[in-house]
Image: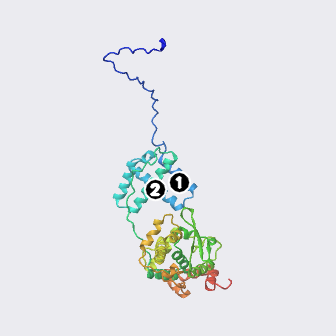
Amino acid sequence: MIHPLRQRQAPAARPAHWMPQRPVRRPEPQPEPLPAVAAYADVSLQQAVQDWRQSHVAAGLSRNTQKSYAGTMEMFARWLALQGIPSPMLAELNTARVRAYITGMMTSGEYKPTTVRSRTIAIKIFARWCADEGFIREENPLGRVKNPKAPQKTSKPFTREEVAALLEAAARSRNAIRDTAMMMLMLATGLRAAEVSGLRVDELDLDRRRVKTLGKGAKERAVAFDEVTSAAMRRWLAARDSERTEVFLSAKGLPISGQTLYGILSRLGAIADVKNTRPHRFRDTFAATFADAHPDRVFQLQGLLGHEALAMSMRYARTAQAVHEVDGASVLDHLGVTAMPEPESIEDVMTTLRGEGYSVQDIMRAVRRSERTVRRVLHPGRAS
């Protein structure tokens, strides 16, 4: 028998139109809108560039890199001034402005495609730095700006005949011993212009025939050279008669600059009737000759040149036309340089200087001032 309280009650009758009701959802309270945040900080372009340059110094970038980046932003600021914005704020560093600047450079006909491309890359690097520093509230502010295309030119190294003509011109120059040693070192090692002008005596190991240099990005590397180059460097170090730490000095006994190096090579090129004797072409000649002689040693070439990217070294591997695999042969061997050029006699030097407009009195006055150096040049093994 079921207990009366446990008996199920029959459900009440529902109306015919009855439908189950859905629960009413009350709207959730919305947060108050945040104030709008400006995409660009209220900073002038000049102040941001100045902070950027200070970061380069702290990061240890080379002076040439710092100068290149600073020059690019100065040119951009000048262009903005021509557009009627003499004191631009950082907000002017936007996609529209940068694209207009690139278009102006490309259509003016005053800039090479490589220059336009390098300046575009520098501006985008600056924009990313501003984003990292919080000056721009966008991860990649100029990400939609494409880098202009530039033709990929292959290097054009010196021929054997041009190398012989240049070394002959160096042997007839006013500073024959220095110019010969400098040119042979550049051909044998592929050093950059800044590395040659800044080379110190303690970075040379003539016994082991090694040169240690600090290249781009503060990366140190060692490059070997041959006995002929070592003999040329020994002769120059014995003749320069200076206590300075720099290897290559001017006629006044001061360290040569990169601009001075350009001038020396241009003058020798004019004497030898060889065009385009910029320092980097000596580096191209070293790299192309090494790749020609050792096509399977691209990684070694990358280390010798101090390249961070392998693609830079691969350019020279594509330039090589023939294979001359000779183990132990130096770059100068493949260029046909097997002996150190001898400087001209005193009579020949006098004749050359007279032909360049120097009087006998000027020549003799310079000789008397450098009497000790002349003796050491003429008699390297004799004590002065």
How dense is the environment of label 2, judged by Cα within 10 Å: few (below 14), some, or many (20 and up)? some
Q: Is residue 89 left or right of residue 342?
A: left
**Disc number at residue 29?**
none
- Residue 74 drawn above or below residue 197: above
Amino acid type, residue under disc 2 in the picture: Ala
Alpha carbons under labels 2 and 1: distance apart:
12 Å
Q: Position of residue 65 (x, y in %)?
A: 51, 60
- Residue 63 drawn above or below residue 37: below
Q: How is the image coloured?
A: rainbow
Q: Position of residue 151 (x, y in %)?
A: 37, 65
Choose between 164 and 12: the one closer to the eye.
Answer: 12
Quadrant, the C terminus: bottom right
Amino acid type, residue under disc 1 in the picture: Arg
Q: Quadrant of residue 63?
A: bottom right
**Disc number at residue 53?**
1
Say which residue label 2 marks.
122
- Outermost residue, right direction? 383
Q: Quadrant of residue 242?
A: bottom right
Cβ–Cβ under 8 Å for marks 2 and 1: no
Q: Is residue 235 left or right of residue 325?
A: right
Choose between 283 and 219: the one closer to the eye.
Answer: 219
- Outermost residue, top direction? 4
Q: Position of residue 69 (x, y in %)?
A: 48, 57
Element class at badge 2: helix
Q: Position of residue 94 (x, y in %)?
A: 41, 47
Q: Earlier in the sequence, mark 2 or mark 1?
A: 1
